[in-house]
Amino acid sequence: MNTDQLKHLLSAVAAGQTSIDAAADQLRQLPFQSLDCATIDHHRALRCGLPEVIFCPGKHPDHVVQIARHLAAQNLPVLATRANADQLAQVRSAFPEVLVDDLSHSFMLNPPAPLPPRNDDPFIAVISAGTADLPVAHEALFTLRATRTPCVRIVDVGVSGLHRLLAHLPTLQRACAVIVVAGMEGALPSVVGGLVSCPVFAVPTSVGYGASFNGLAALLGMLNSCASAVSVLNIDNGFGAAYSASLVYQQVTKHLPKSS
């Protein structure tokens, strides 16, 4: 249950449209629900602004399905990341309507429609330095969709051809946050940080040749960025960057008039 759902329920009780007992039935699963394999935090969207997300590695496919089913019953988007082939196969069998992002190995139940930016409304820009970084960028994009956050996707604009990035400068300068996904030496977030006036979430990827040390070189380069607005996520953590950027979007839009 999220804040909007709770307000709607309380308004229905106040208006006499829902009985107190019926409302209590809907609230009974708050704040958590104990399963044999997990304790589901149904209260997280009320507390933190976004619902619980399933991290699939290490989980039995049956457990992934069980957790997803109980989360989906709340009628909120259910996002799961890093699912393997067995988990995805079982999820597809249990939920024929599931939405899967094959690049990032993520899936979603109750998916909201994509939200492209409208007019001058705030949005998040997601930049992939290279095509090889797309799996991590797609994890960020899929997470933004699950959180109903408008976003734009900019692909293959790394520092080896900087003119490609500059062609997108008007878009970047209108964003309320930018996620920059880059491997190799991890230089792109510093460049972006020097061009925009919003938070930049830098995501190092494990893409690169031997001396990249599976993303460690990019991570250290980003941590030593001279651009003051750059904050660095862990290696390949597109989800964490998108989660943080979506919270920025929520704060930016909190007091804006609702679009009709």
Image: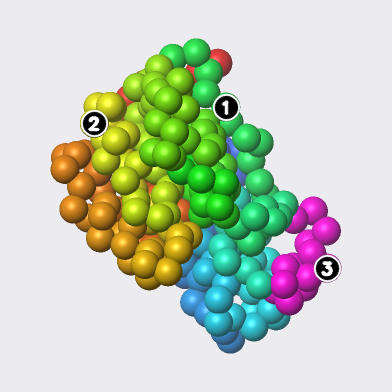
Q: Kindly identify the amino acid type of the residue bearing the numbered disc 1.
A: Pro
What is the quadrant of the C terminus in the image?
A: top right
Residue sitting at x 40%, y 17%: 170
Residue 232's x, y, as percent? 28, 53
- Circle 2 is placed at which residue position? 194
Residue sitting at x 63%, y 40%: 112
> Per the image, is 92 magenta?
yes
Total residue callouts:
3
Mark 1 and mark 2: span between their CA atoms? 25 Å
Q: Kindly identify the amino acid type of the residue bearing the numbered disc 2.
A: Gly
In the figure, 228 relative to 122: above or below? below
Q: What label does residue 116 carry, if any?
A: 1
Q: Are marks 3 and 1 in contact (CB under 8 Å)?
A: no
Residue 242's x, y, as percent? 43, 47
> Per the image, is 148 magenta?
no
Q: What label does residue 93 carry, if any?
A: 3
Residue 144's x, y, as percent? 51, 43
Image-quadrant location for residue 249:
top left
Q: Kindly identify the amino acid type of the residue bearing the numbered disc 3.
A: Ser
Residue 90's x, y, as percent? 77, 73
The local crowd at label 1, few if under 14, some if 14 to 19, many if 20 or more residues have their Cα within 10 Å, is some
The local crowd at label 3, few if under 14, some if 14 to 19, many if 20 or more residues have their Cα within 10 Å, is few
Q: Earlier in the sequence, mark 3 or mark 1?
A: 3
Mark 3 or 1: in front is 1
Is 77 left, or right, of 248 in this rendering?
right
